[in-house]
Image: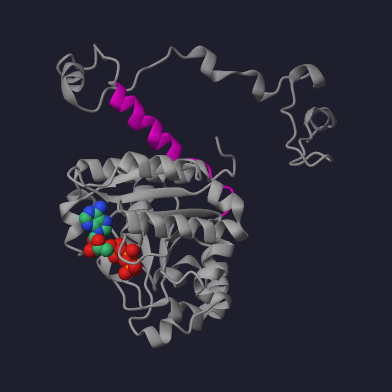
Amino acid sequence: MTAIEKERVVEWPLVEADGNAPSVPRAADHGTAVVTDFQGDSFLRPEQLPPSSGWRHRIWRLSRGAITPAPSAAEVHYRRLLQRIQARINSCQRIAVASGKGGVGKTTATILCGTALAMHRLDRILAIDANPDAGSLGWRVERETESTLSDLLRHAARIERYSDVRALTSQAPSRLEVLASELDPAISQALGEADFARAIGVLERYYSVILCDLGTGLLDSATQGILRLANELVIVAAPSVDAGRVASFTLDFVECRYPEKVRNAVVLLNNVRKDGLVDVGALETHFRKRVRSVIRVPYDRHLASGGPARWELLGSATRDAYIEAAAALAEGFSGVVR
Ligand SMILES: Nc1ncnc2c1ncn2[C@@H]1O[C@H](COP(=O)(O)OP(=O)(O)OP(=O)(O)O)[C@@H](O)[C@H]1O
Ligand SMILES: [Mg+2]
């Protein structure tokens, strides 16, 4: 490099002395041209994405792209949700899916929130079974391996690369990976706070989002550990008075220790039926006062079977609800809550 070239090199520190990101150097500051002077976007005419379905899509296709009708309000909404799901992640996001009540849909919500994230993001998403009572997470996807969380802990010291962890997980067609727990509660019960902290310490090196499916025992050591480590919380409630009460109690329980986690939580009102006697709107209003987002998930015939939860077999309203849920979760990824 000649002396003149050296003089022209603009030093651009990664972090300023005050800890902030540096401002982009401008030509005027240095008396020389820098690439940032070229604002590429200002040379482009605005272009509209073609509508993806309905008569709008047909017009676009029949006119071979000469006519691009404006997208419907529903499509604009959907595109915005996908944009939110693709939010930038700066550090591993740990999401706890909890409820003090059994059978309300925690495991299903863990799988389907994870699926919605995995389908629309390019980074790695993992769901782990943190239910000390031999949870069922591993059975809600097609299993590729019998390995469990205990195997991860056993081999933790030797895990050096992603393929070492991948050997222990099962991957669904959505790209969501699942790490199951032991079927024998005598083994899964023995895993406590320290074990989960160790497991997550290993896993967060390879995954951007880790969803943890909890058991109903809020005082379990594993649950306590996950609640402490979680940066986001999903509370699942069924639309019934008793399940609503337990969900509310779960929020009270977490709020005593982590009030900010409750303010930032997402509540899923799961299994909502049109013919139910409960005023779901009133339940929603109750939870909206306490948490960031409340989403209704309808009763779904495919889910009611209790087999592996397959996205393409869900009703469209259930898919929409889980896209909404994933977008709500992703809104918390930056730590900035709107
Ligand atoms: N929206 C829904 N519509 C119909 N069935 C559902 C829905 N969500 C979940 N289910 C079904 O309800 C049952 C209980 O769900 P799930 O196992 O997810 O609950 P859980 O809270 O994890 O239970 P546990 O406390 O035993 O861990 C399952 O058979 C599941 O497939
Ligand atoms: Mg469960």
Q: Quadrant of the N terminus?
A: top right
Residue depicted at 29% across the width and 42% down the height: 279
Up/down of 183 relative to 87, above or below: below
x and y percent of residue 193 in the render? 56, 75
The quarter of the picture where residue 61 lies is top left
The quarter of the picture where residue 148 lies is bottom left
Up/down of 99 relative to 266, above or below: below
Q: Main secondary structure of the magenta part?
A: helix
- Residue 282 horizontal side relative to residue 25, left or right: left
- Residue 294 horizontal side relative to residue 34, left or right: left
Q: Quadrant of the C terminus?
A: top right
Residue depicted at 83% across the width and 29% down the height: 7
Residue depicted at 47% across the width and 60% down the height: 250
- Name the residue nearer the viewer: 323 or 286: 286
Residue depicted at 45% across the width and 41% down the height: 288
Which image quarter has ligand 1? bottom left
Up/down of 168 relative to 295, above or below: below
Magenta stretch holds residue 118: no
Please state the extent of the stretch shown in magenta in the rendering.
73-91
- Name the residue nearer the viewer: 86 or 215: 215
- Residue 90 horizontal side relative to residue 12, left or right: left
x and y percent of residue 332 in the render? 53, 44
- Name the residue nearer the viewer: 244 or 45: 244
Magenta stretch holds residue 82: yes
- Residue 143 horizontal side relative to residue 224, left or right: left
x and y percent of residue 51 in the render? 26, 23
Up/down of 86 relative to 164, above or below: above
| Residue 175 visible (yes or no) | no
